[in-house]
Amino acid sequence: MRDATFTTPDLTTFTGLDDLGLQTVGQCVKPDKAVLACRVVAEDRWCRRCGCEGRVRDSTVRELAHAPLGWRPTTLRVRLRRYRCTGCGHVWRQDLSCAAAPRCKLTKTALAWALEGLVVAHLSMARIADALGVAWGTANTAVLAEGRRVLISDDTRFEGVHVIGVDEHVWRHTRKGDKYVTVIIDLTGVRDGTGTARLLDMIDGRSKAVFKTWLNQRDQAWREGIEAIAMDGFTGFKTAAAEEVPQAVAVMDPFHVVHLAADALDECRRRTQRDIFGRRGRTGDPLYRARRSLHTGAELLNDKQKARLQDLFADERHTAVEITWSVYQRTITAYRAPDRTAGKTTMTTLIDTIGAGVPAGLPEVARLGRTLRKRADDILAFFDRPGTSNGPTEAINGRLEHLRGIALGFRNLTHYIARSLLEAGGFKRHLHP
């Protein structure tokens, strides 16, 4: 051959069977699939009981799904010799454990390909099963079992965790059964600037007891190493953390604090609308027309929005909305301050102002003030702990929403938890360290 970079074609090497201890001896390629005849390289002819040499008795064929070549399902037909011991009469067959686990219908290469397709390429399990040429249940059982082995059952994923986030989301939209799961996120890498957030665990239900039980299941040394917990306004998470990890600082996430202020603004706008017109807002009503402008940060308002709000606040009947809007804007200003010390000062002043008491006619601001004063320590803790927030937690929840879309929903919670841990539990780092 003229070009020294080329060598004689080797189907065994091309299909990656060297690492599986197999050798290709034949092929049958069809438009819809490929079948490779293989044999085990190792002889394995010595008796495992007495050590005597075995004599070939007969052979059997085992079929294994292999990683697809060009998206064509590829099947390995492995012929295994069976030996009979010349000493004790024991019968055994050649060992295939290098290629596949016992009773598994997928080779180790196929499992690795399927896991990477599931986690990195975001393929659906149906697409993976199609590519491997096996039933959906076969692919799902094998892939999830491998995922549990290499990631989920590995307790080392809990090591080095010092900052966590806790939140909940709806995993299915049905009338029957518990729809909520609690997610625990490792935020240590975000806090230290050494990596991204990852899903640490997911548990059924949403309550104080659920989170407290999970914390109690961790060993004492792990609990003592937790420095901070980012959470939303749900008091159940707060009290569970206080009882199980009292040394950890609870940090209320900025997103949820701003959301509380935004809810107060919406409630005030709707109440004012009903007081003036006796009905809900309609397209031509000033309050309804300005609903989006009211939620925009003051520094991001365009000229049209500024004019709309100026006209809205010129009406004395909208005074309560204007005051609530100013509280909402001050909340945003505190979190957007370039200096955390200045932001903390702004937030402290706001909590003291509306928490001490507000004039009559502002029930939404009064209720917001009571909430902020009750959780003041948790809210202000954010400014002292950069990188500790539930922002990454919400991002992972978004990724899990995408996962449910790919799978067209889940009916089995066990499968959903396993798939979620593979999707957002740092498995990509395991594949590509």
Image: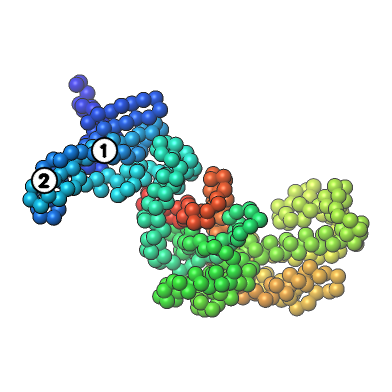
Residue at numbered disc 2: 54
SS assignment at label 1: strand
Name the residue rendered at 72%, 64% in the picture.
261
Q: Amino acid at mark 1?
A: Val
User: How far is mark 2 from mark 1, CA to CA?
Assistant: 19 Å
- The residue at 58%/76% (across/down) is 239
Task: Pick out the residue farthest to the top.
Answer: 2
Q: Residue furthest front?
A: 89
Total numbered badges shown on the rendered structure: 2
Observer-nearest residue: 10 or 358? 10
Q: Is residue 228 left or right of residue 5?
A: right
Q: Which residue is mark 1?
A: 61
Mark 2, Cα crowd under 10 Å, few <14 / some 14-19 / many 20+, is many
Q: Is residue 264 left or right of residue 137?
A: right
From the top left corner, tell me how far across and down residue 27 is, in percent.
28, 28
Q: Is residue 42 above or below residue 176?
A: above
Question: Going 39% across and 48% down the picture, which residue do you hit?
Answer: 142
Please, what is the three-letter code of the amino acid marked with disc 2?
A: Gly
Label 2: which secondary element: strand
The answer, for residue 73, to whether it is visible in the render is yes
* Vertical order, 354 against 190 (above or below): below
251 or 99: nearer the eye?
99
The answer to which of 427 and 86 lies nearer the viewer is 86
Vertical arrangement, residue 150 with respect to residue 260, above or below: above
The structure residue drawn at horizontal position 45% and vertical position 72%, both measured from the top left corner, is 217
Mark toward the start of the polypeptide (2 vs 1):
2
Q: Position of residue 188 (x, y in %)?
A: 46, 64
